[in-house]
Amino acid sequence: MIDVGAIEAARARLAGSIYETPCAHSRTLSELTGTRCYVKLENLQMTGSFKERGAANLLLQLPAEDRARGVVAASAGNHGLAVAFHAARLGIPAVIVMPEWAPLIKVSSARRSGADVILSGANFDEAYAHARELEAARGHVFVHPFDDERVMAGQGTVGLEILEQCPDADAVLVPVGGGGLIAGVATALKARRPAIRVIGVQCAALPAMVRALEAGARVAVPAAATIADGIAVREVGERTLEHARKLVDRVVTVGEEELANAILRLLEIEKTVVEGAGAAPLAALLHRGLGLEGSTVVLLLSGGNIDVTMLARIIERGLVKDGRMVRLTIVLRDRPGALARITELIAEARGNIVQIEHDRAFSSWVAIGETEVEVTLETSGRDHIDALVAHLRGAGYRVDERAG
């Protein structure tokens, strides 16, 4: 197992290579969760995630002959970005293997750093297997995304920073994929503050660490889709499991809707863009009974590399769930001025039309001489929707609300 000395050495080695990210207090999240809540903003790293710490710590320790051979890495995205960026900075050739579904932002960013990016496999495990084949065939040095002591020590530098920035922290919530981040952070935190609680958070779709801790051994969970691609790992590492077993107090899981909700809340409240993995700690604090009320809590927001298309979908779904966007189906007489009258009534009720579709031919449930209009509206909440529907019905229209 790594110790705090290895993490302190990594911190000295990384000086000037990575950003010491802020650990900001959030008054709004504190009120929302009943805690004194801080957010450790690792999404502000140059490549958008904590992965730079471990990748740079490993690359900086490679001897000249290994640097000349070049490196290969398997990654769902963030680790590949980190390896590509720091390999380019150090003049080391890099090959990055990502799953075919890897977010475009991560693929394009790795290529922009000069890495040879290969898309292979339907999931991380298949990309990992291909990267290992390239290691053997080409003689590259393999840079493991989590199960390497140099990587774990680099990730652990986050823990040292948290202790300095929030010295009275009672608990730290950490995303868990393969376990490299929580292994390093828990090592740093427990060495200095044994009483501090370290809580891991996984996506419910891929609870590899939860299953491993239950079984007392590594367990490969079935492949599954999740918006938390940064922690979409089917099997944790041998070294990381050992650290988690000895140092982590608890590991919980969160669902996809909870992750999406946390992404939206961080965007609105903290003006902070995070990916699914980065939102996992807030999702757990909001939706799991962790017994942290009144405590000082640090949420480790591990990364911010989310595709804008995914972010747009999450925002729209969140608006619908919060009652700030609604779709109504309205039946009206098919005659001149009928549509203008509907828009007038909506304006009277302070609704803002986002989209409107007028359908004569394909609506099977309206009579001849009637037409169906589907209107998407921005609203201020559930009460506003109810008032708007009542206003339209009071004017004699048949109105149905589409389920969100």
Image (cartoon, grey):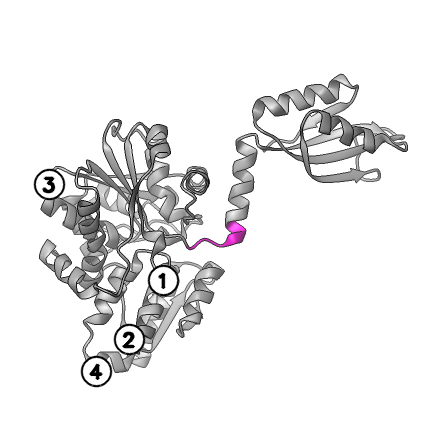
Q: Is residue 233 visible?
A: no
Label for residue 194? Answer: 3
Is disc 3 placed on a helix, strand or loop?
Answer: loop
> First in sequence: mark 3 or mark 2?
2
- Magenta segment: 305-310
> First in sequence: mark 1 or mark 4?
4
Mark 3, mark 2: which one is toward the viewer?
2
What's the CA distance linking mark 1 and mark 2? 20 Å
How crowded is the residue under tag 2: few (<14 C-alpha within 10 Å), some, or many (20+)? few
Q: Does residue 306 show up magenta in the picture? A: yes
Is disc 4 placed on a helix, strand or loop?
Answer: helix
Marks 3/1 in contact by CB < 8 Å: the verdict is no
2 with respect to 273 (left or right): left
What's the CA distance linking mark 4 and mark 2? 13 Å
- Label 1 sits on residue: 75
Quarter holding the N terminus is bottom left
What's the CA distance linking mark 3 and mark 1? 32 Å
Q: 328 or 1, which lies in front?
A: 328
Mark 1, mark 2: which one is toward the viewer?
2
Mark 4, mark 3: which one is toward the viewer?
3
How crowded is the residue under tag 1: few (<14 C-alpha within 10 Å), some, or many (20+)? many
What's the CA distance linking mark 3 and mark 2? 37 Å
- Label 2 sits on residue: 90
> First in sequence: mark 1 or mark 2?
1
Name the residue rendered at 34%, 49% in the picture: 221
- Label 4 sits on residue: 65
Q: Is residue 86 visible?
A: yes
Quarter holding the C terminus is top right
Three-letter residue code for mark 4: Glu
